[in-house]
């Protein structure tokens, strides 16, 4: 593309309306200039500013002029005298004054990265997008996005100004991950009821199943938090399972609708698994097993064993059952306005734990301290089906020191709560979902016997 010359074939007569296949005709347009009055030339000098737009979009990249030898050089020719036209040359050196460069691509990609936040309350670390993040239907989930304009580092000092007047938006699509790893796009009939909140504004799916978000008033490096609410989606349509949410950022004048269709290669996808955080847990035991003697650890039937029936149902990913114990704080016997419990270590009271026939020493059970609470892991439990577990614990036999020094002993009289909790996750990395408890009362049983015998003898 060198030494190109010719007449101006396309021009705009009102800074916007391009007239094609219509060469500039000076005789037609001279009526607009005061230099001609009644068709006669005058001596008045007229100054006019022209804006020339050179469009290289249809030129093949290999035909592009090099940035070293290219310059824009124009001559204004008066064609009134065809035999000897007057040529007006630009002053100065056009090789320096009108030099230009054509760059095939610069700053044309909008990139997005991020991930779901480990803590749904918009805090915590960012989860690796490749891993499946657990989202519970009734609990909002937060997706952190960092969006920026990608610069081609091989091209120095060039900026694509096409984005200067654009606002930043994103197009969300949802895909179901099938068992064979393939994905299927979800439509509006599945996503109806989904709400995505960004900057305090709620967005819902459009008829094609996509959600278009406005992220910022201009294209720049922007950090956004998208809050997903799945609680109002039909469970029969949006089933529990593995999914992807794919983010396709774009720039447009309104920041809501992309001007061009984007392909899947521009998307960044984040994996998640939708789970049911609806659960139920109920703990019961026989009344005779609730109260035990502080001197022997036995109940009124002479047993130190307590059998808890734990009935549960859940739809979690990795449900686990854990047990802990806490003691009612001592207080003024006449003041019951404040009731509080202090966590204790179950192994200070229990020697063995038996779950469904499998017995372990309390000290050998997986133990984790969360805050002040000491949890002992009882293993995984069934999901999506109601199940009842028999958990049998054997109370310790009090030592001589326990009996002689009740104020300093860990084994002491009082009212306790034995709490069974459902967690979701691995042994040492699980989320507490809910709990239920049964009371354990440790005191002197012979007081009741003395009262009973005194009454019967009266």
Image: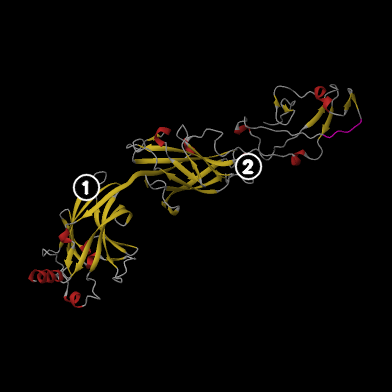
Residue at 75%, 42% in the rendered image: 96
In the rendered structure, the answer to whether residue 195 lies left or right of residue 319 reads: right
The quadrant where residue 240 appears: top left
In the rendered structure, the answer to whether residue 296 lies left or right of residue 171 reads: left
Task: For the N terminus, give its image quadrant.
Answer: top right
Of residue 389 and residue 369, the one placed in the foreground of this image is 389
Q: Is residue 121 above or below residue 10?
A: below
Residue at 15%, 54% in the rendered image: 357
State the residue position of label 1: 387
The quadrant where residue 67 appears: top right
Residue 233, x across and y down, in percent:
39, 39
Residue 181, x across and y down, in percent:
35, 38
Can you see residue 316? no
Q: Earlier in the sequence, mark 1 or mark 2?
A: 2
In this view, the residue farthest toward the right is 43
Residue 70's tag is none
User: Real-space Cα distance between discs 1 and 2?
Assistant: 61 Å
State the residue position of label 2: 164
Highlighted magenta segment, given as a residue range: 43-47
Label 2's element?
loop
Colour setup of the view: secondary structure
Q: Is residue 347 above or below residue 115?
A: below
Q: Is residue 245 above or below residue 75?
A: below
In the rendered structure, the answer to whether residue 275 lies left or right of residue 412 reads: right
Residue at 45%, 40% in the rendered image: 246
In the rendered structure, the answer to whether residue 157 lies left or right of residue 83 reads: left
Residue 99, x across and y down, in percent:
72, 39
């Amino acid at each position: 593309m060198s030494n190109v010359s010719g007449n101006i074939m396309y021009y705009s007569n009102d800074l916007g309306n391009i007239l094609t296949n219509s060469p500039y005709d000076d005789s037609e347009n001279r009526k607009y200039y005061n230099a001609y009055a009644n068709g006669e030339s005058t001596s008045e000098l007229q100054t006019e500013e022209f804006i020339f737009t050179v469009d290289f979009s249809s030129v093949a990249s290999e035909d592009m002029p090099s940035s070293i030898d290219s310059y824009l050089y124009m001559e204004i020719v008066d064609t009134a005298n065809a035999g000897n036209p007057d040529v007006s040359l630009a002053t100065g050196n056009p090789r320096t004054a009108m030099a230009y460069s054509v760059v095939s691509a610069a700053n044309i990609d909008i990139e997005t990265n991020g991930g779901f936040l480990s803590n749904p309350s918009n805090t915590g670390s960012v989860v690796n997008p490749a891993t499946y993040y657990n989202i519970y239907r009734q609990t909002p989930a937060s997706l952190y996005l960092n969006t920026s304009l990608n610069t081609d580092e091989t091209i120095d000092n060039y900026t694509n100004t096409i984005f200067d007047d654009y606002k930043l938006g994103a197009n969300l699509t949802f895909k179901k991950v099938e068992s064979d790893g393939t994905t299927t796009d979800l439509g509006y009939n599945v996503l109806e009821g989904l709400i995505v909140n960004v900057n305090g504004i709620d967005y819902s799916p459009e008829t094609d199943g996509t959600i278009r978000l406005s992220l910022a008033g201009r294209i720049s490096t922007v950090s956004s938090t998208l809050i997903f609410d799945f609680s109002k989606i039909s469970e029969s349509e949006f089933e529990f399972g593995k999914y992807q949410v794919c983010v396709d950022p774009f720039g447009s004048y309104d920041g809501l609708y992309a001007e061009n269709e984007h392909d899947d290669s521009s998307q960044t996808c984040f994996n998640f698994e939708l789970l049911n955080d609806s659960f139920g847990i109920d703990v019961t035991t026989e009344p005779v097993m609730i109260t035990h003697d502080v001197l022997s650890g036995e109940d009124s039937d002479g047993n130190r064993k307590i059998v808890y029936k734990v009935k549960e149902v859940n739809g979690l990913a990795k449900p686990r059952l854990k047990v802990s114990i806490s003691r009612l704080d001592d207080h003024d016997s006449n003041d019951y306005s404040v009731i509080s419990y202090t966590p204790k270590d179950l192994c200070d009271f229990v020697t063995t734990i038996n779950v469904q026939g499998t017995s372990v020493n309390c000290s050998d059970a997986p133990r984790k301290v969360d805050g002040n609470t000491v949890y002992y892991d009882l293993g995984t439990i069934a999901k999506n089906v109601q199940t009842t577990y028999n958990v049998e614990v054997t109370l310790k036999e009090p030592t001589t020191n326990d009996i002689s020094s009740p104020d300093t002993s860990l084994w002491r009289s009082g009212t306790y709560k034995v709490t069974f909790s459902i967690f979701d996750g691995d042994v040492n990395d699980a989320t507490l979902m809910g709990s239920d408890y049964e009371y354990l009362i440790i005191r002197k049983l012979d007081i009741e016997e003395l009262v009973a015998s005194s009454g019967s003898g009266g």
